[in-house]
Amino acid sequence: MGRVRVATWNVNSVKQRKARFLPWLDERLPDVVCLQETKLADDAFTALLGDDLAERGYQVALNGEVQWNGVALLSRVGLDDVVRGLPGGPGFPHQEARAVSATCGGVRVHSVYVPNGREPDSDHYRYKLDWLAALRDAVHRGPEAVVVCGDINIAPTDADVFDPAAFAGHTHVTEPERAALTALLDLGLRDVVRDRWPDERVFSYWDYRAGMFHQDLGMRIDLVLAGAPVADRVAAAWVDRKARKGTGPSDHAPVVVDLDTAPDGDIGPVVPPPSARGRTGKLPQSRGR
């Protein structure tokens, strides 16, 4: 395909984020964009952004629902064989709008919003594990040239949270969740951001409350997992912290991956702040979907 920029972003309501999202597209110029938590039905998404995206050359695949969840896949390098949802996957009780996939320029791209899990050993937690197993099956059935992008709602290791002790007894860090993520990686996928920055403090999510972003008390739960044919092409992989700053941001920052060439350098134009490793704090709690 030549130079391609892939990005994933949990926008936490595309309607609320429109005034930031379109300028971000114009600044970063991604070729493939995976969105999560769009929180709009497909017709409402099209009415809100269809013309703006078409003007920018994007084809769009949607899997949305009113008020909750919702994922989208935007591409300027082709959009073929679109699949909405996870065929045969679990529901709560019905399938939610948490996955959409398509082939973009020869690469199978999955935009996913993994269930939160809410509380360990709850019905929603078991649903999360079942959903991850169904995602693994879907990826296993597909080609080796694959990218899974999105809000995975799992911190892969203790290095991916600001203070492991603060998360004890909570979701996102439990052994069964991490084992489910490992099973997905065992298909031959690589966590390309961690590949590029194995020892850096890198987060993608910061709770809105208690000044968590400004203190850099976050988590890395937004991931780009790539099969070898794609991972071998990665020239840069970085978190766009600038998009988390200012007025009215999402609580997640975009993750950006450049294939073949890195137009903004090896980490992009937004360099993470000096490490605050060792900083501790309390964990604000909210019940995610």
Image: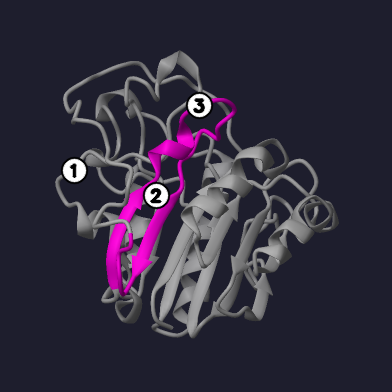
Query: Label 3 is placed on what type of residue?
Result: Gly
Q: Which residue is mark 1?
A: 200
Q: CA distance from mark 2 to mark 3?
A: 33 Å
List x then y, in percent, for residue 70.
Answer: 68, 52
Circles 3 and 1: CB distance less than 8 Å? Answer: no
Q: Nearer the viewer, mark 2 or mark 3?
A: 3
Please identify the quarter of the rendering in which residue 231 is found.
bottom left
* Residue shown at 51% from the left, 67% from the top: 31
Residue visible at 22% across and 38% down? 201
Q: Amino acid at mark 1?
A: Glu
Mark 1 or 2, nearer chain start: 2
Nearer the observer: mark 3 or 1; the answer is: 3
| Residue 136 covered by magenta stretch | no
Q: Which residue is mark 3?
A: 246
Pointer 2 residue: 177
Q: Is residue 234 above or below residue 229?
A: above
Asked which secondary structure carries label 2, the reply is helix
